[in-house]
Amino acid sequence: MAEINKADIKALRDRTGAGLSDVKKALEEAEGDIEVALDAIRKRGLAKAAKREGNTAKEGMVAVRIDDLTDKQIATLIELNAETDFVVKNAKFIALANDVLNAVADSGAEDTEAALAVPLGARTVNDAITEASGVMGERIALSRVIRVQGENVTTYLHHTSPDLPPSIGVIVAHDAAAAPVAKDIARHIAFANPQWLVREDVPAEIVAHETEIARETSINEGKPEAALPKIVEGRMNGFYKENVLTEQPLAQDSKTSVAQHVATTGGKITGYHRIRVGS
């Protein structure tokens, strides 16, 4: 039997909210494989409403810039990290983040590796960050660079703490008609953290896996065989409602779905991206 360590037990409890004995039993049956144990707990209906996002692994901030082109807009979103919030709220760190953002947006770099090589003054972005690390006494890192383009783009930065820079950044791409509701959708995304834009975007293997979980859970609850197809369908609709942007209840009005809110304009959301510092 594989050795079950305390770290794995804690990790699985954090992800599922299940009891200590249930977690230990699932890990023992799965021979220490956390993912197999997680599925077992879910199939037994023991998983509680787990946190959608774990604790932030590192401190930092997000910054965004929109550029207007002839027939479209482009938004550039970056995440710059430090070791402590003491440094993150320092004016020099915030200024560095904005300088990096502008250099990256000007260059058109689309990933972190390319962004680090971009000129910033007489040096590169990487050199500027290294220099700042020495001055501030902490490791500073550019961890993500995102560029989204569309007919229109709308952005939203969210402060999870009033005395710190923004830590959640959202870009929404949409057509001109959807502009009146785009900020609502961006705020919703910051709160709800959808995984996909529409149901059709969910990978087939994930659909199959969640369908199996729904079926096994229903069987373990003693649901009649004849009723299983409808029950599984209902549970899968619940899965989509939780994870697919257009099917989620709007954060500002839970009686209205995101799709319904957008439909009032006759417009369309064509894409989005969300990052949260450290996750």
Image: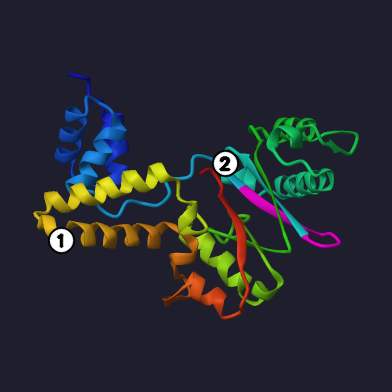
Task: Say how the picture is coloured.
Answer: rainbow
Going by the image, does 191 lie left or right of 27?
right
Specify the segment rendered in magenta.
61-72
Question: Judging from the image, what secondary structure is the residue with disc 1 in?
Answer: helix
Residue at 24% across / 49% down in the picture?
Answer: 47
Residue 45 x, y percent position in the rendering: 19, 50
Measured along the vertical axis of the image, is residue 238 above or below residue 251?
above
Secondary structure, mark 2, is: loop
Above/below status of 169 relative to 129: below
On the question of residue 259 being in view, the answer is yes
How far from the left and from the top, in percent, is residue 228? 18, 57
- 82 or 222, nearer to the observer: 222
Q: Which residue is mark 2?
A: 84
Residue at the (39%, 63%) spot, across then down: 241
Per the rendering, the mark at residue 187 is none
Q: Which residue is mark 1?
A: 227
Q: Is residue 93 or residue 66 the one in the foreground?
A: 66
Q: Quadrant of residue 59?
A: top right
| Drawn side of residue 226 relative to residue 240, left or right | left
49 up-or-down from 83: above or below: below
Residue at image coords 29%, 49%: 211
Q: Main secondary structure of the magenta part?
A: strand
